[in-house]
Image (spheres, helix red, strand yellow):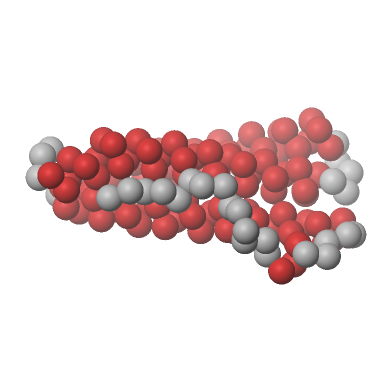
């Protein structure tokens, strides 16, 4: 199974972004792109869960879930610090924060999809453990 969810979001410009001019509109656009990236990550996790079910490996699955929850906290804290460093507390902070979260989520999806498809899903599909 190929877990190809980490492609950059191309050709899928959210409607809210098409005429975004004001800070409020640009923030709504950034939110929409983050939601798209997050949905990609969640679809990837659903496929990974199916691979773990095939391998009957619930202990490892629980560890992965704990690790992912830790990563989400890291991502949000990191992006908060980065946005504050780059934007201070100005009106651009929300754009910087959501842009960072989108980039980090896309990078995480790319990393995990490659890792899981190589390490777990191929083994599960071939019957190896």
Asked whether, in this view, residue 39 is left or right of residue 56, the answer is right
**What residue is drawn where x is 42% and y is 57%?**
43
Between residue 69 and residue 125, name the one nearer to us: 125
**What residue is drawn where x is 78% and y is 56%?**
27
In the rendered image, residue 16, in percent from the top left (x then y), is placed at: 74, 67
In the rendered image, residue 93, in percent from the top left (x then y), is placed at: 81, 44
Where on the picture, by quarter, is residue 32? bottom right
- The reply to whether residue 44 is visible in this rendering is yes
In the rendered image, residue 18, in percent from the top left (x then y), is placed at: 78, 64
In the rendered image, residue 8, in percent from the top left (x then y), is placed at: 57, 47
**What residue is drawn where x is 44% and y is 36%?**
111
Label tally:
0
Asked whether, in this view, residue 104 is left or right of residue 23, the answer is left
Residue extending farthest to the left is: 127
Between residue 118 and residue 69, name the one nearer to us: 118
The C terminus sits in image quarter:
top left
Asked whether, in this view, residue 55 is left or right of residue 90, the answer is left
Asked whether, in this view, residue 24 is left or right of residue 98, the answer is right
**What residue is drawn where x is 81% and y is 57%?**
26
- The reply to whether residue 66 is visible in this rendering is no
Residue extending farthest to the front is: 11
Where on the picture, by quarter, is residue 112? top left
Residue extending farthest to the bottom is: 15
């Amino acid at each position: 199974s190929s877990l190809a969810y980490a492609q950059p979001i191309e050709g899928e410009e959210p409607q809210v972004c098409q005429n975004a001019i004001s800070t409020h509109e640009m923030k709504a656009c950034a939110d929409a792109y983050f939601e798209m990236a997050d949905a990609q990550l969640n679809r990837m996790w659903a496929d990974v869960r199916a691979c773990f079910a095939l391998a009957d490996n619930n202990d490892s699955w629980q560890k992965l879930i704990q690790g992912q929850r830790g990563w989400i906290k890291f991502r949000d804290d990191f992006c908060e610090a980065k946005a504050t460093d780059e934007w201070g507390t100005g009106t651009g902070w929300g754009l910087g924060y959501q842009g960072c979260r989108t980039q980090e989520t896309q990078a995480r999806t790319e990393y995990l999809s490659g890792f899981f498809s190589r390490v777990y899903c191929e083994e599960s599909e071939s019957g190896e453990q």
